[in-house]
Image (cartoon, grey):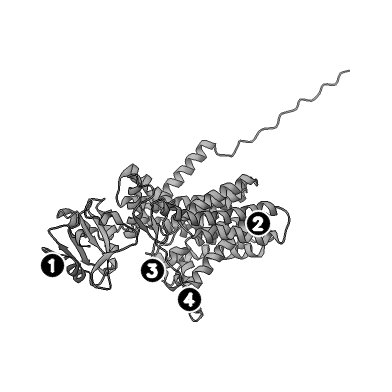
Amino acid sequence: MTTRAPELTPPRTPANPRVPVAWRWALGALGVAVLFFVYWRLSWSAAANSDSAAIAIQGREILHGNWLLRGWWMADVTFYTTEVPQYALLEAVGGFGVWVVHVAAAMSYTLIVVLAALLAKGRATGREGWTRALLGGGIAASPQVSGALIMLLGPDHTGTVVPVLATWVVVDRAPRRWFTAVVVCLLLTWIMVADQVVLLTVIGPLIVAAAVRALRRHEGRRYELSLGAAAAAAAGIGAEIPSLIRHLGGYQVWHFQTHTMPLSKLPRDTWHTVEAVLELFGANVFEPHSPVEAVLVVIHFAGVLAGIAAFGIAVARFFREDAILVPALAVGIALELGAFLVTIHSSNLASIREIVAVMPLGAVLAGRLLAGPLLRLAGASLSRASKAAVAAVAAVVLAGYLGSMAYDVTRASIPSANQDLATWLAGHGLTGGLAAYWQAGSITLDTGGKVTVNSLVVTRQGKLGLYYWESDRAQYNPAEHSATFVVAGGPAVDVPMPGMEKAAIRTFGPPATTYRVGAYTVLVWQDNILRHL
């Protein structure tokens, strides 16, 4: 008798809950587009100034073939390999104008958020990976609502954070092979040419973390030391490239000496440093705010607390972390804040731009180190009341951060500095002139280059002289260019130079015509006054 085998019913395959790859890419692109729009609108709520204009003008020079920026005196930080090419590319697409400053700022900050989320995620997958990315990117995604707008205007080190985070992504995600150290060296050299703050945000942290960890452990020591050596090599090479550019006839760098503060100022400077960190995270309750902003600022304390907690965990686990990223980021934050504290930068909030990397680095650490504990807390056997309380706090914070971004979109746009004067000059056919720094570049940018104004300074002799800061010496050549007017005075917000009108008359003689344009005085001559400089 043959026994018939029982029929087996194949198990039902559950529906795949994963979103198709195409839809994920589409949703991701939509999210990036929304972020860009928010940051673009927020950027317009601050006036572009001559610092931004200088980078835009240099980008225009690059487009016209002046690759080495011959004849230029740069600032102490050049942004030659970061924002200058970014501005040049935008101008190649849409022309020279104020719009470039705001689009570039929105691009940079959008990339900062995306890279912070990617770096916070690391190699984690599933729920923890998503939680890491959302936490790290979420903290970075909602910038301060105050009027400072350090993150979203000119190239005040914010754009440098993009290649800095990209370098950390390479350190974290690339294979642990010799060529990774080469790539890191090339990236850091590229950044070093533009902005020496990379010494504090990547180069120094890699060297310190690799050296200290190598003394305490053997696993991975050779690879980490190779990263430290690559960083050291990049520091040396990157520091020499500007000298090579100058030797080839290119730009020259203004060497600005940073001074340390006396110990007697330490309590005051410590408080200023604390306030600066709060400002970066959008949680500075000590500045005046409208009622709506005050609520949003208080909610942003969650990001500060997350960053502090993550920094403490990173320090405590310095030698126990498998990868160098977390310890190195902690070193980077410590170096940035330490340098800010002991130098003149801590004397006022206007210098917060020097430590803009602290916020995204702190956000990355928060996502990297707090996501796991938060998920375990969510899955713990808490009482219903406790779970409800945790959910309520999370909902309030999420609503606050999203509400802050929505509020940013509603902020009124502010015209560029000196826009009214620039319009008046263009309308009266005055196309070439001279002014103080904070009026000169701004007017050139405001008019899309229709009016060219170069900067001067009042000398000790009471006359006007060239200002060697973000200026092109060729513009003062009377054989190639012409100037017929000088702008003096102006509203206090535009930082007018005292004694400009008297110095202009002493230098060029009495003007043919004098105009009063609001708070400005415009002195006009019949001939090319560049001949008298």
Q: Earlier in the sequence, mark 2 or mark 3?
A: 3
C-alpha span from label 4 to label 1: 45 Å
C-alpha span from label 4 to label 3: 30 Å
C-alpha span from label 2 to label 4: 45 Å
**Camera sees residue 174:** no
Give how far across and how far down residue 521 sits, in percent.
18, 66
| Marks 2 & 4, CB-CB < 8 Å contact | no
Extreme right residue here?
1
Towards the viewer: 7 or 333: 333
Q: Earlier in the sequence, mark 2 or mark 4?
A: 4
Q: Amino acid at mark 1?
A: Pro
Q: Which residue is mark 1?
A: 510
Q: Is residue 369 above or below residue 178?
A: below
Q: Quadrant of residue 386?
A: bottom right
Task: Classify mark 3: residues with Cα within 10 Å, few (<14), some (14-19) or many (20+).
Answer: some
Q: Check disc 1 and report its element: helix, strand or loop.
A: loop
Residue 376 falls left or right of residue 452: right
Give how far across and how far down residue 437 sits, in percent.
29, 63
Q: Amino acid at mark 3?
A: His
